[in-house]
Image (tube, rainbow, N blue to C red):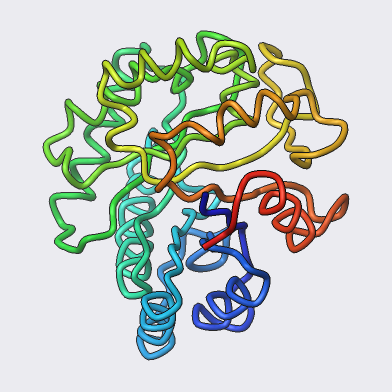
């Protein structure tokens, strides 16, 4: 198994990669720029190149995560332009760092549009970004948290959006365990059924990253509140074990986004390694 966590780029992309190696992570996630802004970053290509080289030498995998304001269903032409420019910047940074791709949350229902129109807007946004993108880093669509039936909470939606966009080869997936639990997609007891469905749909063939998070709330409540893997979370250890040890997920990086205030990522990675294998 390849376990990792989200890390700061305060010391640069190369610094984040070195920190991942120091804490025995086999992978890491980072924000390519200010997580609260859609502004385009003039990044250091030398720093990114050092990150890429270090990861290749140390057998580290990385993914980036788009800033919080990123929306594939933006309201208004100005916001739409900002998101497109920002995502292209995220992809450029990720590619320079040698990352698999950029994690982007699935779109949400736009109030003044029908659900179908919201899906169509999302496909248009993906097309507008990817027609301009020639690198190897992909957009990794992440399943949403939310009550059952909320947009972006089923494998069928994720796969269909990828299939319907004009550049499906530039799109992969990121599976978030807390989001899946919150929406009832994975309630802790239905992993075999979900694996069978995802395999039939072709979802797992395109799965590039996993956000490994426990949930502070019970399944089906739609609440996106992450908890440490071991402890008081509602996803039990035996349920995680069945999920983590799935042979089809062996090469997919498991990235912690758990609250560091409750347990450090370094300690949590140590526990994961002890329980389910080494990190590299």
- Residue 185, image x, y percentages: 53, 16
* Relative vertical location of residue 271 with respect to residue 178 in this rendering, above or below: below
Please name whichever residue, 178 or 107, is drawn nearer the observer in this view of the structure. Answer: 178
Quick check: 265 left or right of 6?
A: right
- Residue 69, image x, y percentages: 52, 48
- Residue 11, image x, y percentages: 61, 83
* Relative vertical location of residue 248 with respect to residue 155 in this rendering, above or below: below
- Going 62% across and 65% down the picture, which residue do you hit? 7
- Going 44% across and 43% down the picture, which residue do you hit? 250
Give residue 25's quadrant in the image.
bottom right
Please name whichever residue, 27 or 161, is drawn nearer the observer in this view of the structure. Answer: 27
* Relative vertical location of residue 278 with respect to residue 178 in this rendering, above or below: below
- Residue 12, image x, y percentages: 55, 82
Give residue 116's quadrant in the image.
top left
Outermost residue on the bottom side: it is 46
Give residue 95's quadrant in the image.
bottom left
* Relative vertical location of residue 232 with respect to residue 200 in this rendering, above or below: below
- Going 38% across and 20% down the picture, which residue do you hit? 155
Please name whichever residue, 262 or 130, is drawn nearer the observer in this view of the structure. Answer: 262
Give the total number of marks visible in the rendering: 0
């Amino acid at each position: 198994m390849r376990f990792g966590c989200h890390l700061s780029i305060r010391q640069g992309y190369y610094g984040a990669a070195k920190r991942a190696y120091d804490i025995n992570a086999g992978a890491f996630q980072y924000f390519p720029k200010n997580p609260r802004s859609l502004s385009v970053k003039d990044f250091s290509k030398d720093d990114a190149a050092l990150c890429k080289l270090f990861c290749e030498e140390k057998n580290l995998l990385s993914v980036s995560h788009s800033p919080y304001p990123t929306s594939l269903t933006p309201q208004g032409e100005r916001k739409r332009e900002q998101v497109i420019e920002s995502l292209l910047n995220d992809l450029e940074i990720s590619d320079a760092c040698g990352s698999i791709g950029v994690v982007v949350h699935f779109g949400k229902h736009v109030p003044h549009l029908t659900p179908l129109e919201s899906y169509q807007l999302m496909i248009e946004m993906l097309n507008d970004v990817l027609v301009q993108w020639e690198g190897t880093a992909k957009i990794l669509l992440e399943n949403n948290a939310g009550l059952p039936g909320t947009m972006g909470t089923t494998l069928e939606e994720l796969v269909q959006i990828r299939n319907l966009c004009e550049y499906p080869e530039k799109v992969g997936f990121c599976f978030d365990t807390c989001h899946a639990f919150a929406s009832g997609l994975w309630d802790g007891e239905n992993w075999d059924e979900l694996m069978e469905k995802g395999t039939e749909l072709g979802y797992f063939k395109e799965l590039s990253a996993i956000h490994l998070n426990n949930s502070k709330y019970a399944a089906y409540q739609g609440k996106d509140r992450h908890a440490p893997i071991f402890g008081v979370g509602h996803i039990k250890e035996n349920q995680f074990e069945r999920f983590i040890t799935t042979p089809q997920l062996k090469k997919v990086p498991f990235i912690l986004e758990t609250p560091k205030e409750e347990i450090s990522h370094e300690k949590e990675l140590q526990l994961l390694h002890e329980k389910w294998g080494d990190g590299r």
